[in-house]
Image (cartoon, coloured by chain):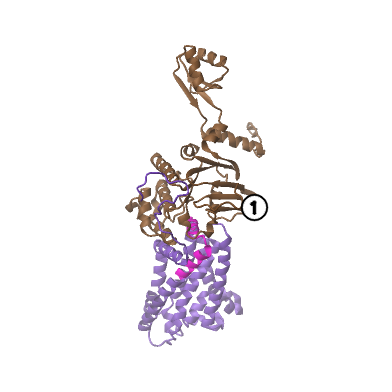
Chain colours: A brown, B purple
Amino acid sequence: MAGAGRAPSVGGVIEVHALTKRYGDRAAVDRLSFDVRPGRVTGFLGPNGAGKSTTMRLILGLDTPTSGSAWVGGRLYRDLSAPLCAVGSLLDAKGVHGGRSARAHLAGLAASNGLPRRRVDEVLELVGLDPATAARRTKGFSLGMGQRLGIASALLGDPEVLMLDEPVNGLDTEGIRWIRNLMRSLAAEGRTVFLSSHLMSELELTAEHLIIIGRGRLLADTPMREFIDRHSGQGTLVRSPEAERLRAVLEDAGARVSADARGGWLARGPSAEAIGELARAHDLALSELTPRRSSLEEVYTAMVASATEYRGTAEGPQEPSRERSDTP
Amino acid sequence: MTSEIVAPAPGRRREAAVPAGRAGFREALAFEWIKFRSLRSTLWVTAVATLLPAPGAVLVAATESIQPEETVLGGALTFATPALMLAAVLGALVVCGEYGSGTMRSTVAAVPRRGTVLAAKGTLLACLLYALALPSCAAAYLVGDALLDDTHAQGDPLPALFGIAATFPVAGLFGLAVGALIRHGAGAITSVIAVLLLPGMLGPLFGPAERWVAGVSPTAALQKLTQSSEAAPELAGSLGAWPSLLLVAGYTALALMGTAALFQRRDV
C-alpha cells in the first residue's frame, strides 16, 4: 500500500506506515499502516485506549514513534515550513491555557506561522464565537465553546488536512450538526478530513470512509457503506395485522423469520421487494415493510468482539460471585 | 472567494484564503511574546520583580536596617535578591504553564522545530529581564543613594549595575531550563528557589566549605556584584564578582543545553 516511489501527493494525503509506539512492553500503536485520502471524510474508530489519540499525536510529531513513520503530503510533519497551513489539528479541548483569552490564543498561533491577523477574526466568525466571548479567558468556557475554539485554531491556516480527535465531544445537537456539515463541506472542497470518534452513530452520518483500530492494530480500512454491507446481516422488518399467517407465508418462501424486539417479524433471505410481491400474491395486508441494515455500532461491536476473541487476549470468564461466607 | 458553484476536482487548488506562512525563529518569537503578555500570571511576576528593588531601598533607608559595613550600592539593592528569585520563577512559569495547561502541544504543533521553541522562549525572557532589571536596579541605587546616610562606603555602581542586571536573565534562563526539565510548575518553582536560596542558608553548616557551597549560587553572584557585605570572601568564596557571574552563566548554559537535548526527544 504505502510503498516507496509513490507519486508526490499534491494535496494532503496522510500516510501512516508500520507505525509503532511502545510504552514499556505495551504497544499503544502496533505496526499500523493506512492512508487517509483527500476529498472525503475519513472516520477513525476504535474503543477507548485503542490508540487513536496516540496515532494522531505521532502523525503530528508530538510523540516520537518507536518505529515506523507518518507522512503528511509526502513530508514528515516536523519538516513542514508552515505546519498550520498544512495540517489543522484538534487534539483535546485542553490545548488552551485557561488564563488566556480565546483571541490571544488564536493570535499567538497566527503569529507563530506568520499568518495575517485578520485570520483570527475570520475563524472566530466561522466557528460562531462572538467578539465578547473571544475576549474572555477560556477558563470559564463550556466544553462546547472550548471545542469551537479548538476547531477555530485548526482552521486558522486554511489547511489541506484536518485532523480532529473527538470533535463533537461536549457539543449539543446543534453543534454536532454544525461540525458534521463543516467537515463534509471541507472534504467537498478537496481537503483531507480525518476525524476520530467513539460516537459510532456520529461517524455513520459523517464519514464516507472508515479506519478502525483495536488495541493499536488495524482492524479495517474500508468505505463506510461497504463495511456495513459486508458485516451486517441483511434483514427486512415486516408487520401485518395477520402476523401468524405472514410468518407461515414467509417461512414457506424460505425466509428465516424471527420476532423483532419492537414487534413484527425480522425476515432474512428474500429481499423487501420479494416479500412485497409475496404478500400481494397471498392477499396479505402489510403495515410495515422496512429493509434493515445493521448500524455501524452493531457491526463494530460484533467486529471488535470477534477480533478480541481471535487474538485470544480476552479475559477468562469472570469468577461467579460467591456468597458471603463470613455470615454466621 | 470564487463564484464557482462546481465542486473542485480532486487535486485542483482552491483559492487560498491565507497567504503562505512560515514558522521560523521570528514568528516563534512573536508567538512567545503574545503568549507572555496575554497571561496574568507572567505579567504579575514580571511586574513585581521589576518594581521590588526601588521600594526595597526606601524600606532599608527608612528602617535604618543597613549594616554599618554595608555599601550604599549593596544596601540599596537588598531587594534585588528576592526580585532575582522571581526572575527564576518566571523562567519556570513560562514553560511549566504550557505543560500544565496542555498548551505545549499546540505550541509544538505550530512550531515543530523544538529548538526554535526553546530558543524563542529564552530570547524573549532574557531580553525582557535585562531590559527591565537595568532601569529597575539603577532606580533602586539612585533611591538608596539619596536616602541612605553618608557614613557608608559608596560602592562602585558602574559597571557593576550592568552585571547586576545581567544576573536576572541568567536566573530566568536557569528557571527556564529547570522548568523544561521538570515540566511540573510546583516542582520546578520549588527547585529553582531551592537552588537560589539554600546555598546561602545552609552554607554555614559546611564550616570552612561554606564559601564553596554558598559561592556558586546566582544569589552569591548578585551579592558580589552589589559589593554587599554578605558576599565577603569567607562567606561566598574568593572568586570575584564578574567571574562569579560567568560561572553562573556557564552552568546555566549547560543546563539549557541539557534540557534542550531532552526537549527534542521527549513526547509532549
Residue B268: percent from left, percent from top: 54, 57
**Chain letter of the residue beneath label 1 in the structure image:** A
Q: Residue at x 46, y 78 (%)?
A: B164
Q: Dot 1 lies on which element?
A: loop
Residue B59: percent from left, percent from top: 38, 76
Magenta-tinted stretch: B101-125
- The answer to whether B187 is drawn above or below residue B209 in the figure is above
Towards the viewer: A285 or B117: A285
Residue type, numbered disc 1 = Gly
Residue A15 is covered by the magenta coloring: no
Towards the viewer: A22 or B192: A22
Is residue B189 visible to the viewer in this orientation of the structure?
Answer: no
- Other residues around mark 1 within 10 Å, as few (<14) / some (14–19) / many (≥20): few
- The answer to whether A57 is drawn above or below residue B230 in the figure is above
Q: Residue at x 64, y 36 (%)?
A: A309
- Residue at image mark 1: A24
Residue B109 is covered by the magenta coloring: yes
Is B175 left or right of A18, judged from the image as shown? left
Is residue A113 visible to the viewer in this orientation of the structure?
Answer: yes
Residue A15: percent from left, percent from top: 56, 50
Is A182 left or right of B268, judged from the image as shown? left
